[in-house]
Structures are given as structure tokens and as C-alpha cells.
Amino acid sequence: MEIFANPDTWISLLTLTFMEVVLGIDNIVFISIIVSRLPKEQQARGRNIGLMLALVFRVILLMFISWIVSASDPIFSINLPFTPEDFAVSWRDIILFAGGLFLLAKSVTEIHNKLEGEEEEAHGTAKVHATLSKVLIQIILIDIVFSFDSILTAVGLAQEIIIMIIAVILAMGIMLIFAKYVSDFVNKHPTVKMLALAFLILIGFMLVVEALHQHIPKGYIYFAMFFSLLVEMLNMRLRKKTTPVHLRQNEIIEEEEATPVR
């Protein structure tokens, strides 16, 4: 425990915790969207289980940190006609590529279901809910990819495994506290939910590009996400001001009726 007497340790811990929270935003968004397909009484349970699984995967991967670091080493090469050198493929590339494709496919499918769902509701068709087991399987698959990418970032910010584990636990605790608020906000506003799905498409594309050895600074991606969200917030504020008074009153009444009596 002598390492905690070093101020650099606390700086690394705070920095890594902040980075884990930032990198976990896309995980929260994915879990919030996929959990929304569950029956309402199971959504909180599915969300909490999903985040706890993310914590478990991150800690387990930290225990195999040496393998994670070596996962970037090539395992075979592919001779491509349009490149001067052979394309080296590592386990990291395979995991990121498969995870990126899965995230792209899932996001596009969710957008399609969202549009089709609106058509079904217009025709009076009941919404079909997903099962908890299917939702958890999808969360596990994407958790593995996000955990893998998160651990690779952690290696560059800290050297002690105990610091990484503490930072991951702290970050996951913060995400557990705010996950419900993020989920409720995303699911309450259809345009925000569509924007979140577009973010996931962007992240899936970034994972695929990373697997092809084309680095994209994550700062650009997250800046685009926050900027788009800021613009959407301004649009929501503008729509609220321009909405007729009687419609706003109806929305308030509907929200009060939907709020459970304590």
C-alpha cells in the first residue's frame, strides 16, 4: 500500500476513473436502448445486471492484463493487392472488428424497429417485448468489446493493476448512479434516442476502422457526440417554447398520470 503515499498514484486514479466514465458512456447508451425493449418492470433489473456484468468483465480482463497487452501482437498476415505490405491481424483486431460489426448491425436494426414500431402503433399493433435472457446475451457481447477497449486505454494511464481495478469500480459506481437518469431521458425523447443510435453507429464504425489499423482519436468522436447532443437540447428547448399551451398542459397531465404515487 506504499503506492498510495505517492501523489502520482492519486492523480493516475482520478484520471483513469474519469476516462473510464467517459469511455463507459457508449456502454450506458447501448444498455439503455437495448433494455428499453424489455417489459417495464424488468428494465431496471436488466440495466443493473448489464452494468454489473461490464464491471465483472473489466476486472477479469485486468487479471489477464499480460494477455491483453500481447493481444495486439500479430497472429497471422494477409497479402492484400492494394497494400505495399502484408496486413497483420491480431486478436485485438478480430475482437474490435467483430464488435464493431455487431454494434453497427444492432444499431441499424434498432433504428429500423423504431420506425416500424411507430407504424405498428399507428395501426394498433401491440409492441413485442424482448426476453431478459436475449437482452443480457447482447449486453454481454458488447460488454466484452467495450471492456477490451477500455482496458487497453487503462494500460497507458496506470501501471499498477490495483489502481486500474479501483478506478474501474469507482467509474462503474458512478455509472450505476446515473444510468437510470440517462436511460429515462433517452427513452422519454424519441429524437434523443434516434441520436443515441446514430452515436452507436459512429462508434461501431470507429471500432471497425481501428481494427483495420486506422487510428481515429476518440476525442473527435466524443466531441461530435456532445456537440450534437447540445444542438438537440437547444432544439428541445425551442420546441417547448413554440408548442401550444394546451398541448404542453396535456403533456404535463400525462407525465403526472404516468408517475407512480408514493
Image (cartoon, rainbow, N blue to C red):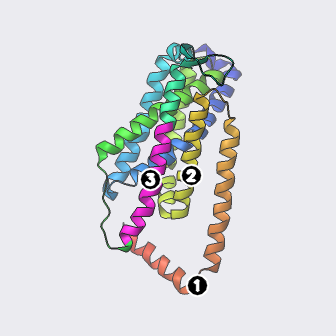
Q: Distance between the residues labelled 1 and 3?
A: 31 Å
Which residue is pictured at 57% across the width and 56% down the height? 195
Q: Is mark 3 on a helix, strand or loop?
A: helix
Give neighbour class at mark 2: few <14, some 14-19, many 20+ (Cα, 10 Å).
Answer: some
Residue 102 is a magenta residue = yes
Q: Which mark, by number, is residue 37?
A: none
Which residue is pictured at 52% across the width and 18% down the height? 68
**Outermost residue, front side:** 81
Q: Is mark 2 on a helix, strand or loop?
A: helix
Locate residue 114: give its quadrant. Answer: bottom left
- Which residue is more in the foreground, 38 or 76? 76
Image: magenta residue range: 101-121
Q: Where is residue 198 in the image (x, y as percent from the top left)?
A: 56, 52
Q: Which mark, by number, is residue 244?
A: 1
Q: Position of residue 46 (x, y in %)?
A: 36, 46
**Above-or-below relation of 116 to 37:** below
Q: Where is residue 34 in the image (x, y as percent from the top left)?
A: 41, 49
**Above-or-below relation of 58 to 221:** above
Pair 2/1: label in front: 2
Is residue 169 visible to us here? no
Q: Which amino acid does label 2 sit on?
A: Ala
Q: Which amino acid does label 3 sit on?
A: Glu
Q: Which of marks 2 and 3 is nearer the N terminus?
A: 3
**Which residue, given by chain and number where applicable, does mark 2 sit on?**
198
Q: Distance between the residues labelled 2 and 3?
A: 10 Å
Locate residue 40: give its quadrant. Answer: bottom left
Which residue is pictured at 48% across the width and 63% down the height? 188
Q: Which of marks 1 and 3 is nearer the N terminus?
A: 3
**Which residue, given by chain and number where applicable, does mark 3 sit on?**
110
| Dominant SS in magenta | helix
